[in-house]
Image (cartoon, helix red, strand yellow):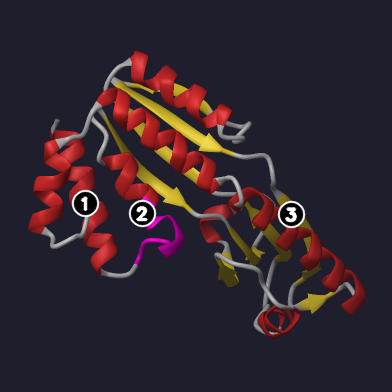
Amino acid sequence: MKAKREALQSLFTAMREGKVDEDIIDLLLLINSINGIYTTSSCSGRIGIIEEPALGAKPLSRWLIKVHREMTFEEAREALKKAEKGLIFLKSQPPIFHIVAEDIEKAKKLHELGLASGFKYTTFKVISTRYLVEINATEYLTAPLGRDGRVLIDDEYLSFALEVGNSMLMRSKGRLPRLGRNFRKLREELGEDELFYELAEKFEIKAR
């Protein structure tokens, strides 16, 4: 499975460089150790403040702060001082996993697994000859904070928005242990992939 080899090499390289969210490393290793599936881009969930030049201009947006844990009021206030131009939003986003399956039967299993783990926005689609499953949850928050460097909300609203965003983030992260348990069951069913262990050893990644 050439595509999986390339995906694993990218993952292990990113791990070496500290570019993988630490709180999902074990889960990513578990998923990729399963026969016939592998991850592409994934995120453990995050909250941050982002500056967008215009609505929908995501490629040109700039994070003023982005963390994969709860954000403090002081961090948010400090980040807002860096705002310059465009719309300013507080964003809270749940964990998300993009997983490729080698056939439609495995894709269906992944889809069912995501839903059973509480990730209610889980979907899958066919891209060329690949079956891509997106395990995703519902806890998304986008709250406007200002425009063009001007913060248009008071401290009380910022504190309230942070409280809601942090709560949504931690609620969605709370499903990760159940997701891990279900992937361990799937590994028992589909078996382990020796390619994963071969490359993990090559990259000196502790995988067993």
Q: Is residue 120 above or below residue 178?
A: above
Name the side, left or right, on which 50 lies relative to 128: right
Determine whether 75 is above or below 38 in the image. below
Residue 192: x %, y % from top left? 21, 34
SS class, disc 3: strand
Where does the magenta region start and end? 19-26
**Which mark, by number, is residue 26?**
2
What secondary structure is the magenta-colored segment mainly? helix
First in residue order: circle 1 vs circle 3 = 3
Of badges 1 and 3, the one in the foreground is 1
Q: Is residue 190 above or below residue 117?
A: above
> Residue 27, percent across and down?
39, 49
The residue beneath circle 1 is 208
Asked whether the residues under the numbered discs 3 and 2 touch, taking CB atoms below 8 Å apart as contact, a structural biologist would say: no
- Per the image, label 1 sits on a secondary structure element best described as loop
Residue drawn at point x = 14 percent, y = 46 percent: 197
User: Is 20 covered by the magenta stretch?
Assistant: yes
Q: Callout 1: few (<14), some (14-19), or many (20+) C-alpha neighbours within 10 Å?
A: few
Count residues near mark 3 (Cα–Cα under 10 Å), then give few for <14, some for 14-19, many for 20+: some
**Near-viewer residue (44 or 174):** 174
* Local secondary structure at mark 2: helix
Res. 60 mark: none
